[in-house]
Image (spheres, rainbow, N blue to C red):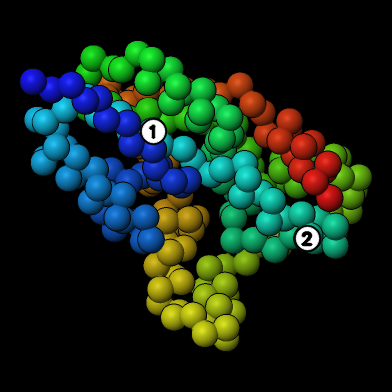
Amino acid sequence: MKYISLILFYNQNSIGTYKPGIGGLEFHYYNEQILKNKLIGNVNSISIIKPSKFYSGLLVNLSEIEKGEINSFLDKTKIYSYTSLDDIADVISKIIENPPKRVFKTTFVESDRITVPELTKLYAKVFNKPDLKWNYVPAENVADLMETYGFNRDTVLNIFTSLSPKFHDELHSELYSNRDDITVIKGTHSLKEYVTQMKNLK
């Protein structure tokens, strides 16, 4: 008999891992294929929890906010999805208490969405930096810089593939696909709330 209901929690930016060719996140795709094709008959259910970008990833901006200038590869024209770790914990605890009846189920946890200009304004207001600037840096430039520190340029570009503007819309198509085997749960912890907490970490 099958007694196990498996819950698989992915690291951040696992949106779009339903297909190959997504750079440094491609291993998630192969994990899903193993679960669907090899393990599915041996467990009651498999629940995959997929977050987008973690709020905590914004902590890298703290020092640049203080300097008044942020350099990033995030495209100013795109809308980015973010996830709170608290919201992930809430979702997983509910799934543990009530495992899904569907044999294979994917759940996205999205806490907030924001554009780069909106995030810049939020930073400027919360940190009292009215002249804060956000500079777009192409992934190629980042790879060139990392190469000077001894990293393999192609490896760096491969990692950035899944995060680049070129792939953004394609990856997020899974999140907005309305497939019946996908559930999108909106979290309750806002980005504004988290950025306010960031200020207290200075």
Left or right side of 81 for 70: right
Say if 182 sits above or below 195 in the image: above
Left or right side of 175 for 165: right
Q: Which of the two discs, 1 and 2, labels the residue nearer the N terminus? A: 1
How dense is the environment of label 1, judged by Cα within 10 Å: few (below 14), some, or many (20 and up)?
many
Q: Residue at x 33, y 36 (%)?
A: 8
Find residue 11 and report its horizontal and vertical position in percent. 44, 46
Marks 1, 2: nearer the viewer: 1
**Could one spot residue 180 in this view of the protein?**
yes
Q: Residue at x 45, y 22 (%)?
A: 93
Quarter of the view holding residue 177 = top left
Find residue 35 and report its horizontal and vertical position in percent. 19, 40
Left or right side of 11 for 132: right
Residue type (three-letter) at the residue carrying disc 1: Ile
> Quick one: SS at disc 1?
strand
Residue type (three-letter) at the residue carrying disc 2: Glu
Say if 190 sits above or below 202 in the image: above
Count of marks placed on residues? 2
Quarter of the view holding residue 49 = top left
Q: Residue at x 37, y 55 (%)?
A: 25
> Quick one: SS at disc 2?
helix
Asked if the residues shown at circle 1 and circle 2 are in contact, with their CB atoms under 8 angstroms apart, the answer is no
What residue would you read off at disc 1? 49
**Could one spot residue 79 in this view of the protein?**
no
Which residue occupies the foreground of this view, 77 or 36?
36
Spatial distance from mark 1 to mark 2, Cα to Cα? 32 Å
Quarter of the view holding residue 87 = top right
Left or right side of 50 for 68: right
Find residue 168 and report its horizontal and vertical position in percent. 45, 49
Q: Which mark is residue 64?
A: 2
For the N terminus, which image quadrant? top left
